[in-house]
Image: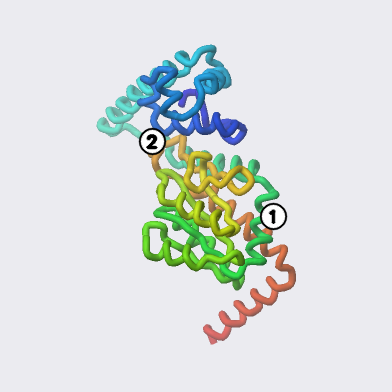
Amino acid sequence: MNPAIDFYEHYFELSKTSKRIADSIIASPLAFSYMSLHEASQKIDVSEVSLIKFARLYGFEKYTELRNAVREYLLTESGENADKTRRINRGERKPDCLQQFRQDISRNINVTLSRVDSSIIERCTDEILEAQDIYLFGHDVSKSCADYFSRKLKILRFNSHTVLLGDVYETRSVLAKLAPTDFVVVFSFRTYYSPTRSVVEMCQKKNIKIIGITDSSTSPAYIGAENTIFCQTIAKNTDICDFNTMSAPIAVIELILLRLAEKMGGRISEIMKEINGIGKSIHQ
């Protein structure tokens, strides 16, 4: 968005309702740019007053001014993209994309780590230490985060398992055997896999300890502010806005692991000695 309506800049400071509005506009700016106040209220499932307050939050006196600003941005962006295409076709040099990527990755990590709730990290590590088994659910790119987390937990000698949400049989089997002694982490990032919500609901029904790691309160992995870790994943400086960067979720995983290792105390030294000993024996 243009500077006047940069919803990313202070996203984590917004209220739950404002985040829902921002997420909706970011996801479908073209549709929003032609909605009346009543239509937007119905579509986003918020009150008309909330939309007006949201507009004023970004410096617009009326809802229509915000809507028109989004429309103007789309028209400007279309012109800029067309100009980019013409310049590329003429063989002209493209902008420094790597620098834009650096900015995206750095911003996402810094914003996420500065806003993460320490109490959730503390509770998450305590529950991992106490759990009999740890199950990490994810789908597509979210599954890659689950795999990474699980692999590092296994190195620390935890009973960790990943579950591919797209595999219905595996998901149902795991949900059926979950016990109160287990701990569940659910990953979900745009574009969301809606059946993720059924995992959350089943865990809540069975009183299983669970946290969600996601990017929005509209995500199916959202489990309330006290049980959700938010990660900023959008590559806003690029033309590939649908491609999420997983730098922030990985940073959150590392934060959890470092705190977990600290709580394990001397056991970490024992594990590392064991790993080094196996490595030396293999190379002898």
What residue is at 62 percent from the left and 45 percent from the top? 113
Instruction: Tell me the crowding category of disc 1: few under 14, some 14 to 19, or many 20 or more residues within 10 angstroms, Cα based.
Output: some
Q: Mark 1 points at which residue?
A: 122
Mark carried by residue 74:
none
Q: Is residue 155 visible?
A: no
Kind of element beneath mark 2: loop
The answer to whether residue 3 is above or below residue 245 is above
Q: Mark 2 points at which residue?
A: 239
The answer to whether residue 164 is above or below residue 1 is below
- The structure's colour scheme is rainbow
Amino acid, disc 2: Asp
Residue furthest out toward the top: 61
The answer to whether residue 34 is above or below residue 92 is above
The location of residue 131, given as percent across then percent down, is 62, 66
Q: Is residue 194 toward the left or the right of residue 17 in the image? A: left
Amino acid, disc 1: Glu
- The C terminus - image quarter: bottom right
